Amino acid sequence: MMSPPIRTALALLLTLAVTTHVRADKPERPVRVGMIGLDTSHVVAFTKLVNDPDAAGELAQITIAAGFPGGNPEFPLSRDRVNRFTEQLRGMDVEIVASIDELLEKVDAVMLESVDGGQHLEQARLVFAAGKPLFIDKPLAASLEDALAIYELGLETGTPWFSASSSRFTPGYLELRNSNDQVGKVLGCDAYSQSRAAPFHPDLFWYGVHGVDLLYTVMGRGCESVSAVQTDYTESVRGVWSDGRVGTYRSIREHTGKTGLGATVFGTDGIVHHNQYYDYEPLVREVARFFVSKQPPVDPEETLEEFVFMAAAERSKTESGAPVELEHVLKEARQTLAGRSGKDGR
């Protein structure tokens, strides 16, 4: 039999081991996260993942602590849902506050969730001013000028931020970006997704961004020109990259029939098709990891280029599908933003 001193020592070691394990998953003070815009189903789905008592790994490092309802009475999907989702979060013990300023006093990091991308710039401006790490849910913005302004605010304030669709981190896609045994070097990609229109947003910005983000997940930066055509059934966008690679995005109108999410990747060693549908958990894990590390998993330069890509597609459609240079579209957006800043002093 063990002597009492030996039993005591073993018990202490076991307690220390258990405590160390718990602290690895459950820090004494997890990162307190606030949500701005409680008018999307994402806020409920994300909170369930993060605040689950059994959450482990990255999810256990953060907690959804407070939320500001926000909302836009002129945007039906916001107006008709904000109260319902707010009450659901209240029932999950998330503190509901009356302003963004009050929210920022209570949290360490922010998820900007407002379903209307047109609200994102002004809401993000307050978060950047406070220096809080920021995740901006899709879409980054409802115009290229607003997307550019958010990008520049991030640079000016030195605040870490990123924006991404859940498609980017859904299993199977990110692995195709770099050379691998199946594909080799990526030579091109054909991506597709459902594309819903929304008030105050260009055609692709609000929901098409899921598929465009997927295209960039595989292809990376470097698109130089875009041509696009739109019919009642679909919108097809063709991008030519600076190294000669070609990437396409097909938006599928939800009223036309079967929709989905997927990509066919063409490489030096093979052709691979993958069609896993959206999975929220990998995205939320990346957000949690970002809030702890302050290291964005997506380069804001890449996110900005995606919105230049979509803005160029809008221009091409008005010009009978003629190729449109991304550099020219971005230059015009910078000029417009400079003029806008001169008028309002920002």
Image: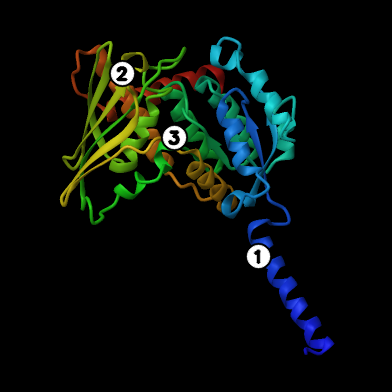
Tell me the distance, in whole angstroms, between the alpha carbons under discs 2 and 1: 52 Å
Q: Which of the two marks, 2 or 1, is nearer to us in this view?
A: 1
Indicate left or right for 111 with 9 as reference: left
Residue hosting label 3 = 165
Residue 242 locus on image (x, y percent): 20, 39
Q: Nearer the viewer, residue 330 or 245?
A: 245
Going by the numbered disc 2, the residue's amino acid type is Glu
Q: Position of residue 341 (x, y in %)?
A: 50, 22
Q: Nearer the viewer, mark 3 or mark 2?
A: 3
Quadrant position of residue 346: top right
Disc sitting over residue 271 in the figure: none
Q: Residue at x 40, y 45 (%)?
A: 171
Q: Quadrant of residue 275?
A: top left
The N terminus, quarter of image? bottom right
Residue 314's tag is 2
The crowd level at tag 3 (other Cα within 10 Å; few <14, some 14-19, many 20+) is: many
**Left or right, residue 280 beside residue 214:** right
Callout in the foreground (3, 1): 1
The amino acid marked with disc number 3 is Ser
Left or right: residue 64 versus residue 140 is right
Residue found at the very far right of the displayed protein: 4
Estimate the spatial distance between the alpha carbons at disc 3 and disc 1, rounded to whole Å.
32 Å
x%, y% of residue 344? 55, 18
Q: Is residue 132 left or right of residue 150?
A: right
The image shows residue 52, relative to residue 334, as above or below, that is below
Numbered disc 1: secondary structure: helix
Q: Which three-letter amino acid code belongs to the residue tagged 1?
A: His
Looking at the rendering, which quadrant does residue 105 occupy?
top right
- Residue 309 visible? The answer is yes
Which residue in the structure is indicated by mark 1? 21
Q: Which of the two labelled residues, at mark 3 and mark 2, occupies the earlier sequence position?
A: 3
Name which of mark 2 and mark 1 comes first in the sequence. Answer: 1
